[in-house]
Image (cartoon, rainbow, N blue to C red):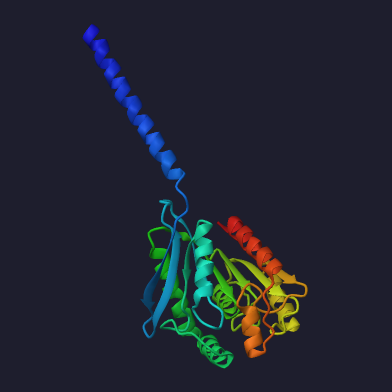
Amino acid sequence: MKNYMHLLLIVGLVVLGSCKSKTESKKASEELPIKVQGKEVAYATDSTNLKGYIAYDMNSNEKRPGVLIVHEWWGHNDYVRRRADMLAELGYTALAVDMYGDGKLAGHPDDAGKFAMSVMTNLPEATARFNAAMDLLKSHSSVDGEKIGAVGYCFGGSVVLTMANSGADLDAVAAFHSGVQLPVMPNDRLKAKVLVCNGADDPFINPESVVAFKGALDSINADYTYLSYPGVKHSFTSKEADANGKKFNLPLVYDADADEKSWASLQQLFSEAF
């Protein structure tokens, strides 16, 4: 009997130690700091090689929503990669996409306009490039493929809105300082919640196009928010806007307040959509 009780005591201590170890291990895992891993990725359509950048918290083992980010008309640059890192810090896996091919960048507005136009006037190829990025994002080990959003800046905003209006399988889309006179306007194929954040004094955005865009959304009872910031001009989320505006004599102006408020609205959009 004495030996039996001794054996029970040993077993109990082993079980207790095991449970404690698992609890401590889980606790340690939960307390790991965010560690953003960002790396370049290569992917392609049938006709175009593309160079993207993916960012995620490598200290988290949980599946999380994935977010596509489409660049301004300058191309896939450091700015869009910084935004990917910022989204990774919030707990998403973000893929900064390449809509021009081969990571091509524009050094002058004339080139940027040509690059952007070549995409927006060839919707089948634009869709193929967007879908190739989405497939890559969904296949990443950290991503819950049932929860996908898209964010776009300037040209990129027009791209994500057009893709959503074309029926892309997106839960939410957000466009910043984006034109809304689109090759595909809102229609009953739109599935996503929509957020648009624009400057009220952005000369690149025609007021009549905003009325038409909102009217199309209202006609299908879309779930959308359109925010217009008084006194704010184009490219207000980019700290490079002032320098580019002066260099090329364009109405590009960074606005810290609008940048902060629009980023908060994006976080609210994703918290509701996911």
User: Farthest left residue?
Assistant: 3
Task: Residue at 41% x, 56% y: name it.
Answer: 58
Q: Residue at 36% x, 33% y: name it.
A: 21
Q: Residue 109: image x %, image y %? A: 58, 90
The quarter holding residue 193 reads bottom right
Image vertical order of residue 82 relative to residue 247, above or below: above
Q: Is residue 30 visible?
A: yes
- Residue shown at 58% from the left, 70% from the top: 190
Rendered location of residue 40, percent (x, y)? 39, 71
Looking at the picture, tell me which residue is in the foreground, 85 or 220: 85
Is residue 207 shown left or right of residue 83? right
Is residue 63 shown above or below 187? above
- Nearest the viewer among 234 and 185 is 234
Q: Quadrant of residue 151?
A: bottom right
Quadrant in the picture for the C terminus: bottom right
Question: Which residue appears at 56% of the width and 74% of the height?
Answer: 160
Q: Is residue 169 visible?
A: no
Q: Position of residue 167 (x, y in %)?
A: 53, 72
Q: Is residue 248 left or right of residue 11?
A: right
Q: Quadrant of residue 222?
A: bottom right
